[in-house]
């Protein structure tokens, strides 16, 4: 039986699973039903399944008849706190929760890659490890799975993200940095409170905050190579309790840092602290920075991207394999790609008439699952077979 025939056979199950997940969406770290359904399905195929990894995560191993490399296929499972308004007959039955990013499709695709590959077990060399992570939407599920050891013995990783704004059947990928690292920071400034009419008696944290906000703008404009990309934004400024005549003792600045390159990320993290502390010290106060690190940037391995491109050209045709620009949004697939070489690619899942398409995280989010999902299975299956070589 050819691969296309095998995929045609499992397509009804593939669509049914995705639509079942769509009707029963679960938020980050609450993917109990989704995870249990996947575990049952994968156990039914004869895979070695470990439940309850990092909470609701799941690992399923497909061991080939002969030894070889290990390729990890990663999928996410979580939905979003959005009231669905897509109008599809299989809309969410849970008020206020919706699969508005396509993770229902990712989970169903990965499970059905297992269903296709299990038929080739006798000729399979090595192991295919299917990892279903919780909580991608809050960028918190991948790291505990990595810490639980799911990457042990893994040589290469692969995953896909469906994309509603790209017509079904198109594939987008780029070598190197593809999605940004997103880190949040809070700057705590301390001066000395005083009467507003006697500023010489205090250390003014409002002025300190103002100088700090202005100085931070120089990190990207004056210290970062113009060819490279970074964002430093202060999104919150808090000082004072509403009085006209009090110099506040403390001020708080909150912001986000977006970068693609680890060296630039580390340097800007260090420089944000140095600038804030230097300005505070020069003015007679103090500052400390608190980081809430996000995931690192999604960085694809150039050689494996080239191999993936060859596979994708055979599946969808050369003209449908596009090199897409990097995006400033993040994805914790980065936690896997940061530790093992691999590829994360976009698979178009929208309509070919763009006005029908809604962006991700929109209440009207919709994907052409009948066209996109079987292609997702074929692309991942062939890529896994190629990466096992
Ligand atoms: Ni997503």
Image (tube, helix red, strand yellow):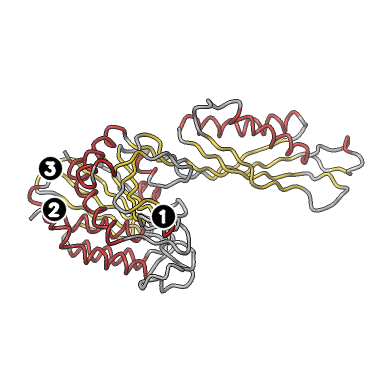
Q: Position of residue 303 (x, y in %)?
A: 27, 32
In the image, is 65 to the left or to the right of 198? left
Position of the N terminus by quadrant: bottom left
Spatial CA span between label 2 and label 1: 31 Å
Q: Position of residue 321 (x, y in %)?
A: 29, 42
Q: Are marks 3 and 1 in contact (CB under 8 Å)?
A: no
- Mark 2 vs mark 1: in front: 1
SS class, disc 1:
helix
Residue 154 image-quadrant placement: top left
Position of the C terminus by quadrant: top left
- Mark 3 vs mark 2: in front: 2
SS class, disc 3:
strand
Q: Which residue is mark 2?
A: 3
Q: Which residue is mark 1?
A: 354
Q: Which residue is mark 3?
A: 67
In the image, is 342 to the left or to the right of 79? left
């Amino acid at each position: 039986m050819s691969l296309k025939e095998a995929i045609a056979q499992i397509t009804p199950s593939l669509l049914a699973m995705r639509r079942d997940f769509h009707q029963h969406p679960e938020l980050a770290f609450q993917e109990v039903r989704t995870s249990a359904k996947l575990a049952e399905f994968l156990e039914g195929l004869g895979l070695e399944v470990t439940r309850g990894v990092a909470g609701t995560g799941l690992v399923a191993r497909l061991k080939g008849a002969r030894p070889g490399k290990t390729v990890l296929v990663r999928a996410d499972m979580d939905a979003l706190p959005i009231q669905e308004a897509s109008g599809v007959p299989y809309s969410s039955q849970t008020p206020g929760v919706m699969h508005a990013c396509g993770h229902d499709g990712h989970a169903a695709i990965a499970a059905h890659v297992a269903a296709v590959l299990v038929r080739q077990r006798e000729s399979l060399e090595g192991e295919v490890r299917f990892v279903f992570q919780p909580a991608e939407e809050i960028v918190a599920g991948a790291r505990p799975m990595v810490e639980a050891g799911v990457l042990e013995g893994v040589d290469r990783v692969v995953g896909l993200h469906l994309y509603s704004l790209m017509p079904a059947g198109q594939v987008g990928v780029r070598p190197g940095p593809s999605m940004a690292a997103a880190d949040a920071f809070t700057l705590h400034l301390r001066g000395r409170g005083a009467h507003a009419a006697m500023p010489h008696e205090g250390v003014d944290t409002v002025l300190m905050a103002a100088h700090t906000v202005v100085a931070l703008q120089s990190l990207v404009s004056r210290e970062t190579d113009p060819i490279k990309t970074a964002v430093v934004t202060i999104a919150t400024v808090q000082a004072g309790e509403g009085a006209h005549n009090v110099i506040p003792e403390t001020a708080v600045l909150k912001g986000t840092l977006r970068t693609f390159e680890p060296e630039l990320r580390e340097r800007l993290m260090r420089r944000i602290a140095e600038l804030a502390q230097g300005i505070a010290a020069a003015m007679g106060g103090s500052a400390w920075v608190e980081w809430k690190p996000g995931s690192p940037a999604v960085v694809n391995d150039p050689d494996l991207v080239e191999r993936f491109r060859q596979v994708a050209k055979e599946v969808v045709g050369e003209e449908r394999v596009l090199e897409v620009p990097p995006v400033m949004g993040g994805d914790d697939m980065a936690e896997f790609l940061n530790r093992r070489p691999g590829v994360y690619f976009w698979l178009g899942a929208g309509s070919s008439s763009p006005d029908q398409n809604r962006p991700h995280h929109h209440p009207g989010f919709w994907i052409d699952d009948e066209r996109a999902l079987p292609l997702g299975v074929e692309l991942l299956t062939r890529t896994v077979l190629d990466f096992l070589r």
